[in-house]
Image: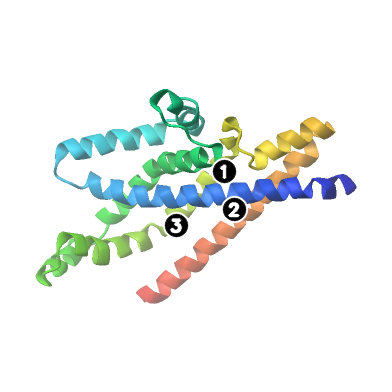
């Protein structure tokens, strides 16, 4: 117990880093995913083709590869990122691909009559997307979005490959000092589990609120 209490500040620092990087990366992934989903529906084929290529790369490439390209390959092109920033950007560009597919499906599920009604009200395409299509798509895609956010949180465990001091990096450092393996990694597993539970419960609360508004 004494050893755990001594290491508690390290766990707390790692948890704070994991939370801030993961949440920031999720925000970027969601916003970029919405933009990509909108671009996929455009009839300008060069744009949709380029976006489709990016989405397929983001969905197929391992996160560790994306992080290596950003953090270690970036300096060759003049892109120098601190581990913290590289972690956020890496999670964002990596998670945008799956989110784009989720939002594309949600936008396609919006009834055609809703768009026609918006046109009759003289709404511009941008206003139709922002005020009619997007809110409904977000409500329809909430469960898979929560699932993808949880998956992105779990993927953040590989951020240690760019020397970022998140939970996995902290557990490795503690293990190398104390020669204990089970305790550090069980501890961070419990911390990840707690964060996942919070995200899951938040998703269920939002689902209930959307259901109440829709009823």
Measured Cα–Cα span from mark 3 to mark 1: 17 Å
Report the residue marked by disc 1. 154
In this image, 20 relative to 98: left or right?
right
In this view, the residue in front, 162 or 99, is 162
In this view, the residue in front, 143 or 118, is 118
Disc 1 vs disc 2: Cβ atoms closer than 8 Å? yes
Q: Is residue 45 visible?
A: yes
Label 1: element kind: helix
Report the residue marked by disc 2. 196
Q: Disc number at residue 143?
A: 3
Residue 63 is situated, as x and y percent measured from the top left of the image, at: 49, 34
In this image, 76 relative to 190: left or right?
left
Q: What is the basis of the colouring in this image?
A: rainbow
Front position among marks 3 and 2: 2
Residue 206 is situated, as x and y percent measured from the top left of the image, at: 47, 67
Please tell me whether residue 107 is drawn above or below residue 171 in the rendered image: below
- Residue appearing at x 49%, y 43% in the figure: 88
Front position among marks 3 and 1: 1
Which image quadrant is residue 120 in? bottom left
3 or 2: tag closer to the N-terminus: 3
Identify the image quadrant of the C terminus.
bottom left
Please tell me whether residue 109 is drawn above or below residue 44 in the rendered image: below
Q: Residues within 10 Å of mark 3 (few under 14, many from 20)?
A: some
- Residue appearing at x 43%, y 39% in the figure: 94
- Residue appearing at x 23%, y 46% in the figure: 39
């Amino acid at each position: 117990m004494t050893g755990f209490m001594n290491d508690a500040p390290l766990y707390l620092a790692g948890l704070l880093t994991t939370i801030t990087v993961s949440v920031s990366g999720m925000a970027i992934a969601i916003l970029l995913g919405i933009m990509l989903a909108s671009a996929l529906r455009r009839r300008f084929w060069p744009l949709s083709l380029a976006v489709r290529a990016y989405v397929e790369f983001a969905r197929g490439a391992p996160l560790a590869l994306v992080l290596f390209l950003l953090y270690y390959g970036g300096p060759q092109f003049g892109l120098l990122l601190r581990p913290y920033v590289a972690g956020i950007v890496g999670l964002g560009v990596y998670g945008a691909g799956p989110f784009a597919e989720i939002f594309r499906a949600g936008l396609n599920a919006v009834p055609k009559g809703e768009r026609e009604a918006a046109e009759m009200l003289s709404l511009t395409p941008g206003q139709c997307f922002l005020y009619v299509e997007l809110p409904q798509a977000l409500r329809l895609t909430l469960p898979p979005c929560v699932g993808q956010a949880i998956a992105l949180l779990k993927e953040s465990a590989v951020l240690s490959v760019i020397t970022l001091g998140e939970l996995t990096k902290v557990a490795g450092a503690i293990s190398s000092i104390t020669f204990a393996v089970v305790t550090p990694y069980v501890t961070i597993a419990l911390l990840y589990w707690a964060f996942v539970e919070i995200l899951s419960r938040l998703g269920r609360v939002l689902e209930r609120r959307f259901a109440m508004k829709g009823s």
